[in-house]
Image (tube, rainbow, N blue to C red):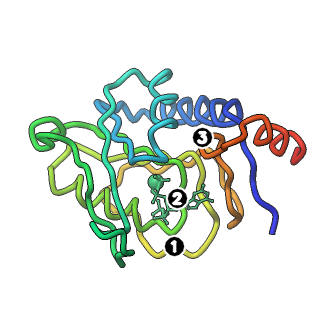
Amino acid sequence: MEKYWFTYEDIHSTIRDLAERIRQSGYDADAIVAIGSGGFIPARILRTYIKKPIFAVGIAYYDDENKPTDTPHKVQWVDEVERKLTGKRILLVDEVDDSRTTLEYCIRELLTHKPASVAVAVLHNKDKEKRGVIPPEVKLYLAGRELEDRWICYPWDALDIEEQNRQAHAAR
Ligand code: G4P
Ligand code: MG
């Protein structure tokens, strides 16, 4: 099966368009919450267009002995979350909505901290059957691009960035 290949420029322009759609929706975020590590670079680019503080959270699918776990769990979470995010309009950012498990977990965790609202922005959404759900409390869900269920090669995972760019250009 063919893979998707993207350059940093592809990612940047997708996020610029995503930021414009967020603006048009009228959702005025107070804070960006980035799901690490895939969400970090997209969140930082988004901040170029939506100038709000970024909080980082980390989720893992492996335990302390590096054994896989069935459900995600927190490995890093916002310090003093309640004080920082309670009553705030949160924009949750990740790179890919794949199975949706991580997203659902993060949204439910954030909701326990009583934010004013939660919106979700992902760079890419895969068109597939999802294991997780976006809870109904979520005010807005936007994906930069809708993709088929294929493996996506992100530039930040590339050991050879020139080869990454060649693949991305060849796939056009
Ligand atoms: P979701 O709930 O947000 O849909 O994500 P899910 O837990 O299903 O994804 C599990 C991991 O697989 C995530 O990495 C996600 O980024 C990664 N992943 C899923 N599909 C792709 C893909 O097509 N390409 C790449 N490169 N990664 C994909 P993670 O455990 O959050 O690790 P990290 O890379 O964010 O640190
Ligand atoms: Mg991730």
Residue 59: x and y in percent read 34, 57
Which label belongs to residue 97?
2
Q: Residue at x 11, y 40 (%)?
A: 80
Q: Quick one: which residue is furthest to the front in this view?
A: 65
Q: Residue at x 62, y 62 (%)?
A: 126
Task: Give the residue pinned by disc 3.
Answer: 156
Residue 87 or residue 168, whichever sits in front = 168
Q: In terms of image quadrants, where is residue 83? A: top left
Q: Position of residue 165 (x, y in %)?
A: 79, 37
Q: Percent position (x, y) of residue 115? A: 20, 45
Amino acid type of the residue that numbered disc 3 sits on in the rendered structure: Trp
Give the labeled residue for mark 1: 130
Of circles 3 and 2, which is in front? Answer: 3
Along the polypeptide, which appears first: circle 3 or circle 2? 2
Q: Is the CB–ligand 1 distance for label 1 below 8 Å?
A: yes
- Mark 1 and mark 2 lie on one chain; the one further toward the N terminus is 2
Taking 147 as reference, is 89 left or right? left
Q: Which is nearer the eye, 162 or 90? A: 162
